[in-house]
Amino acid sequence: MKKFFWKSDDFDLFLIDGLEQRMNALQTLVQPKFEKLGRHFADQLSAHGSDEFFPHVARHLRRTVNPPTDSWVAVAPSKRGYKALPHFQIGLWQTHLFIIIAVIYENPDKKGIAERLENNINVLTTLPESYLVSGDHMKPDAVHITKAEREGLTQLLTRLQTVKKAEFLVGRHLTREEAIAMTTDEFIAFAEETVDQLLPVYDIIIGKE
């Protein structure tokens, strides 16, 4: 019997009204899955050899009124936190799933990261055409790398250096329909492949020699 990792309810919970009600659904349905994914991919990334990685499931503890519109597990080379570091994320919006590397606004080395990526832009332009980039983790939209082209990527990286709130995200999306149609084995294989294909980008981001 086939086992499926994601279900429609995992995505539909972002339509539930009320902070408490939505958080209850998130904690019941999705966070246990994020915990499993976090442990799995912390092990995969640790085996890459640059650092030991640790999972961090988003808890949304600062929210007092507005319910979250997305959620994720981050995997980063620190036990204490992930926001100030380049990190991997697997997460959901109501419309789709994402697997990305994220450099968000708390990162103190955005200028260095942008310069390293600009100097090694081929590590981005040679990614498969299914990969997307974004400059804002608070928005669900992203642009395919092939559509952004070298000019669009350079603009994103320039903004990362010069705008305090600027961010840089790169990875793959699955529509909710694609995600729920995958068996557990198919999804894990897809996610592992995505992380593997992103590792050269991560190595440039962290300045690994």
Image: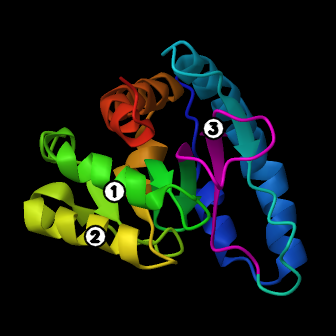
Query: Element under label 3?
Result: strand
Q: Position of residue 146 (x, y in %)?
A: 11, 57
Q: How far across and how far down the image is residue 16, in percent?
A: 73, 77
Q: Disc 2 versus disc 3: distance between alpha carbons?
A: 24 Å
Residue tagged 1: 114
Rendered view: 100 above or below 202: below
Does the segment drawn in magenta span residue 83? yes
Secondary element at tag 2: helix
Circle 2: residue type = Thr
Among numbered discs 2 and 3, the one appearing first in the sequence: 3
Do the CB atoms of the residues marked 2 and 3 lie less than 8 Å apart?
Answer: no
Q: Amino acid at mark 1?
A: Ala
Label 1 Cα neighbours within 10 Å, binned few <14 / some 14-19 / many ≥20: many
Q: Secondary structure at mark 1?
A: helix
Identify which residue is drawn at 49% across, 27% down: 188
Q: Is residue 48 visible?
A: yes
Crowd tier of the residue under label 3, counting other residues whose Cα lies within 10 Å: few below 14, some 14–19, many 20 or above: many
Q: Earlier in the sequence, mark 2 or mark 1?
A: 1
From the image, state whether disc 3 or disc 1 is nearer to you: 1
Q: Which residue is mark 3?
A: 76
Residue 202 sits in quarter: top left
Q: Calculate the distance from the C-alpha at mark 2 to the C-alpha at mark 1.
A: 7 Å
**Contact? badges 2 and 1 (CB < 8 Å):** yes
Which span of residues is magenta-colored? 67-89
- Residue drawn 54% across and 12% down? 47
Q: Which residue is mark 2?
A: 158
The answer to which image quadrant residue 122 occupies is top left
